[in-house]
């Protein structure tokens, strides 16, 4: 059976060429063809010996992501792609053209098992975790599109479907590959990993000495409400999550971002702003306030603009850095999981 070569890192590619009796440097050339020059087949790799190209083609495939659907916002700034892999599984990847560069939101699993009740990605459960190659394939798909305009992917957020810290090894391999010169050569600082709060793996990540930005979904400043919104809180309660975030910030010297979806009448009152402030006081942290996209099934609405600014102002007045997320791509339902669900339903 043919094996997929896309997603192998340099040491693995070096093993492949050495097993075929060729010197080590051929591995680097192969890596550059795959990840820098986006070669679609082995025959186009014209600085590799013909014999090697033939042997590679006999044993390996190059599996990239194939687009099955796409949506573009009216302002042209946000594009959402449903990208499929060899087994037919599809995930969403989003391109956001921000004033500071091109940011992409990458999925780490097909669907999600975490059951956050505001999220469309979890409605059909988790199908499987993605490999490092499949996360890289999402990135390269968009990078190749941008290259046609003389641009590139500038920042990556692993915030699409899935819980990246439950796909730890593959996600770490992907992050390390993004950083390599033979791949995109991205700085670790331009990569953000977003978790629902898998405490043991936050500690594990803190030990990796990778200065990636950690983003933790909080969404409530008290356990009862957080457990209702995010069942993961029953396993890893708020205090433990925030303690792990604090340690991550101290060890990596990176500011941790806490995501907080604002829902009218649910988590946006003064008492909750006070509790949130007390929870994060003294921590190298910032809060990203995300006014919710209305969820009809739950009758959840976004708070009025003055309530949003009141909540944000309370935090900043009490020395917690807070920003309100800019709205992008509402007209194409940029909330994660919605395009995939539509596609699943239509089949
Ligand atoms: S918000 Fe993230 S962790 Fe929660 S269900 Fe959705 S994809 Fe999973």
Image (cartoon, rainbow, N blue to C red):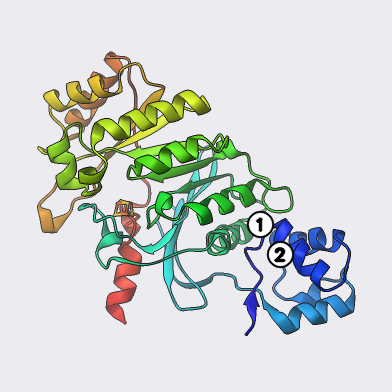
Q: Position of residue 105 (x, y in %)?
A: 46, 52
Q: Position of residue 68 (x, y in %)?
A: 45, 74
Q: Nearer the viewer, residue 198 or 47?
A: 198
Helix, strand or loop status at disc 1: helix
Quadrant including the N terminus? bottom right
Q: Is residue 37 above or below residue 169?
A: below
Q: Position of residue 197 (x, y in %)?
A: 33, 42
How many discs appear? 2
Gap in angstroms between the C-alphas marked 1 and 2: 15 Å
Image side of residue 88 versus residue 242, left or right: right
Is ligand 1 less than 8 Å from the beta carbon at label 1? no
Residue picked out by circle 1: 147
Residue picked out by circle 2: 34
Is ligand 1 less than 8 Å from the beta carbon at label 2? no
Tag 1: Cα neighbours inside 10 Å, few (<14), some, or many (≥20)? few
Q: Quadrant of residue 214?
A: top left
**Label whose residue precedes the other's in the sequence (1 or 2):** 2
Tag 2: Cα neighbours inside 10 Å, few (<14), some, or many (≥20)? many
Identity of the residue drawn at 76% across and 59% down: 32
Image side of residue 328 versus residue 183, left or right: left
Q: Is residue 281 above or below residue 12?
A: above
Whether the residues at callouts 1 and 2 have beta carbons within 8 Å, the answer is: no
């Amino acid at each position: 059976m043919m094996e997929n070569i896309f997603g192998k890192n340099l040491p693995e590619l070096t093993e492949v060429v050495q097993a075929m009796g060729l010197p080590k440097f051929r591995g680097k050339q192969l890596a550059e063809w795959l990840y820098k020059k986006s070669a679609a087949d082995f025959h186009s790799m014209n600085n590799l010996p013909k014999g090697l190209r033939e042997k590679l083609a006999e044993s390996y495939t190059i599996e990239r992501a194939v687009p099955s659907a796409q949506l573009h916002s009216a302002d042209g700034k946000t594009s959402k792609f449903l990208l499929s892999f060899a087994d037919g599984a599809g995930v969403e990847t989003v391109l956001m053209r921000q004033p500071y560069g091109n940011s992409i939101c990458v999925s780490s699993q097909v669907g999600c098992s975490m059951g956050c009740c505001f999220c469309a990605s979890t409605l059909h459960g988790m199908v499987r975790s993605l490999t490092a190659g499949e996360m890289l394939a999402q990135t390269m798909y968009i990078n190749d599109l941008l290259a046609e305009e003389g641009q590139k992917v500038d920042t990556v957020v692993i915030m699409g479907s899935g819980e990246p810290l439950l796909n730890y090894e593959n996600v770490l391999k992907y992050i390390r590959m993004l950083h390599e010169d033979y791949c995109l050569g991205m700085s670790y600082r331009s990569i953000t990993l977003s978790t629902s709060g898998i405490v043991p793996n936050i500690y594990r990540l803190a030990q990796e000495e990778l200065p990636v930005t950690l983003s933790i979904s909080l969404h409530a400043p008290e356990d009862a409400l957080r457990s209702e919104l995010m069942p993961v809180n029953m396993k890893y309660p708020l205090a433990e999550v925030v303690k792990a975030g604090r340690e991550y910030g101290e060890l990596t010297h990176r500011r941790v971002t806490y995501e907080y979806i604002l829902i009218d009448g649910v988590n946006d009152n003064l008492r909750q702003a006070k509790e949130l402030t007390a929870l994060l006081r003294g921590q190298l942290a910032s809060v990203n306030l995300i006014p919710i996209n209305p969820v009809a099934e739950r009758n959840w609405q976004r708070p009025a603009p003055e309530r949003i600014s009141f909540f944000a102002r309370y935090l900043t007045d009490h020395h917690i850095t807070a920003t309100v997320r800019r709205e992008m791509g509402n007209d194409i339902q940029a909330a994660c999981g919605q395009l995939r669900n539509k596609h699943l339903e239509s089949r």
